[in-house]
Amino acid sequence: QVHLVESGGGSVQAGGSLRLSCMTYGYTFRKLRMGWFRQAPGKEREGVAVIDSDGSTTYADSVKGRFTISEGNALNTINLQMYSLKPEDTAMYYCAADELPTDHLLDERWYHYWGQGTQVTISL
């Protein structure tokens, strides 16, 4: 059974930085397409950043230039380095992964595996 486990959330002031990590357990066959999604209270979940199995990255416009997604040292681990955080970045952040290729990289419907989420809170 595949499990994704996020870590690194927390509370910081606007302008600060945080680093999220996601580890995959139970899947060692090949590199997965992995990404970060977030959901703020009262809003739909949205794609934030994705790293495809070939290492290419895709970002939501709202985080370009501030967030960086990268691969970790272990297979199917990823990190999300977040800089210049804003109150509007406050959300539950979820790690997601899938085995199959897609052009819909930031669309949550194309991800089969999900973590439980980690809270990120940005205050003024």
Image (cartoon, rainbow, N blue to C red):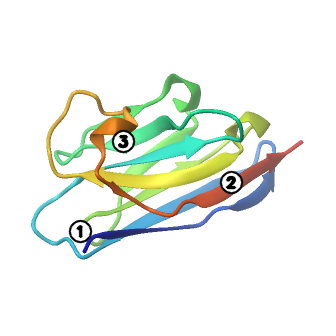
Residue 77, relative to residue 64: is it above or below? Answer: below
How many angstroms separate mark 2 from mark 3 (CA)? 18 Å
Q: Nearer the viewer, residue 71 or 44?
A: 44
The mark nearer the N terminus, 2 or 3, is 3
Q: What residue type is labelled 2?
A: Val
Of marks 1 and 3, which one's residue comes earlier in the chain? 3
**Marks 1 and 3 close (CB-CB < 8 Å):** no
Residue hosting label 1: 75
**What is the C-alpha distance between the residues marked 1 and 3?**
15 Å
Residue under the point 28% across and 51% down: 112
How far apart in space, not on screen, are marks 1 and 2 (Cα)? Answer: 25 Å
Quadrant where the N terminus is found in the figure: bottom left
Is disc 1 surrounded by few (<14), some (14 to 19) or many (20+) residues within 10 Å? some
**Residue at the disc numbered 3:** 50
Residue at the farthest right position: 124
Marks 1/2 in contact by CB < 8 Å: the verdict is no
Asked if residue 113 is positioned above or below residue 89 in the image, the reply reads below
- In the picture, residue 73 is in which quadrant? bottom left
Answer whether labels 2 and 3 touch (C-beta < 8 Å): no
- Residue 51 picture quarter: top left
Side of 17 relative to 61 (left or right)? right
Which element type, helix, strand or loop, lies under badge 1? loop
Residue type beneath disc 1: Leu
Residue 72 placed where, x, y %? Answer: 35, 65
Foreground residue, 46 or 8?
Answer: 46
Of the numbered discs 1 and 2, the one sitting upstream in the chain is 1
Identify the residue position indicated by label 2 in the image. Answer: 120
Asked if residue 62 is positioned above or below residue 16 in the image, the reply reads above
Q: Nearer the viewer, mark 1 or mark 2?
A: 2
Residue drawn at x 71%, y 44% is: 90
